[in-house]
Image (cartoon, rainbow, N blue to C red):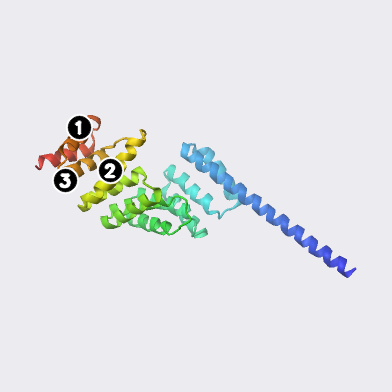
Amino acid sequence: MTVVLVMFLVSGCVTVSDSRFSREEDRDKAVHNYVQLATAYIGQGNLERARKHLDRALELSPDNAGALSAMALLQNSDGESKLAEESFRKALSSDQDYTRGRVYYGAFLYGERRFGEARDQFLAASKDTKYEDRASVFFNLGMSEERLDNNDAAVAAYRRSVELSRGDAKSLLALSRTLVKEGDYSVASRYYDRLIRLMQQNPRYRHSPESLLTGIRIARYFDERDRESSLALQLRNNFPESVEYQQYKVLISND
């Protein structure tokens, strides 16, 4: 009887425990799905649907970092920047290792022109070697460093972004541009040539005013007049109202 009773109690405990864990797993899965849906709706601009899903997620798990971060995105889209920051802080307080929330918060701070604080968030996020989009984290870090006039740090961040993305177009351009600012035209030219090859291989990549002016500056340094003329013609014809075209006119007037 004693053996049977012990076996019954153990069996009963296991059954209850499994059931509890099963409910927790179901809850976590539901919260994850609500957050995924809400984030997609925010991207589409459908804030009401997003809010419904996030309200449900936070009912199930009030301290869930993903739900709180997504709510911050929604609140910021609504123009409620103070509420958004509160939600971001709650999310990171709940889970300091939630890198996606830290990246969202960094982007929020960058948009608020709080570049030093944004840099700190992106720098912390860059330490997470398991984060799936580290290339973008380093790109954002480079942008923040540029805004703080830390050009050397910006170059280092953009170079890391290029390495991790295996030559993403926006990272190649940013690195080329900042190297030109540093006066390192030889290295800038190598990265810019990689960008041009990428554009030739993939027709969906097209010149922007920024890429044209960067190429013009490199061509002028190496006295490649035909290349400079071709890029300048594209800049004038395609982007006559751009800031970069005005900068080019100042550049040639200084000669």
Q: Earlier in the sequence, mark 1 or mark 2?
A: 2
Q: Position of residue 11 (x, y in %)?
A: 80, 61
> Of the residues shown, which amino acid type is indicated by label 1?
Leu
**Residue marked by disc 2:** 193
* Viewport quadrant of the N terminus: bottom right
Q: CA distance from mark 1 to mark 2?
A: 19 Å
The residue closer to the viewer here, 54 or 231, is 231
The numbered dot on residue 221 is 3
Nearer to us of marks 1 and 3 is 3
> Of the residues shown, which amino acid type is indicated by label 3?
Tyr
Q: CA distance from mark 1 to mark 3?
A: 18 Å
| Residue drawn at 22 percent across, 39 percent down | 244
Q: Earlier in the sequence, mark 1 or mark 3?
A: 3
Q: Quadrant of residue 19?
A: bottom right
| Residue drawn at 44 percent across, 54 percent down | 102
Q: Earlier in the sequence, mark 3 or mark 2?
A: 2
Secondary structure beneath dot 1 equals helix
> Of the residues shown, which amino acid type is indicated by label 2?
Asp
Q: Position of residue 106 (x, y in %)?
A: 40, 53
Q: CA distance from mark 3 to mark 2?
A: 15 Å
Nearer to us of marks 3 and 2 is 2
**Residue marked by disc 1:** 233
Nearer to us of marks 1 and 2 is 2
Q: Position of residue 41 (x, y in %)?
A: 51, 39
Residue 205 seen: no
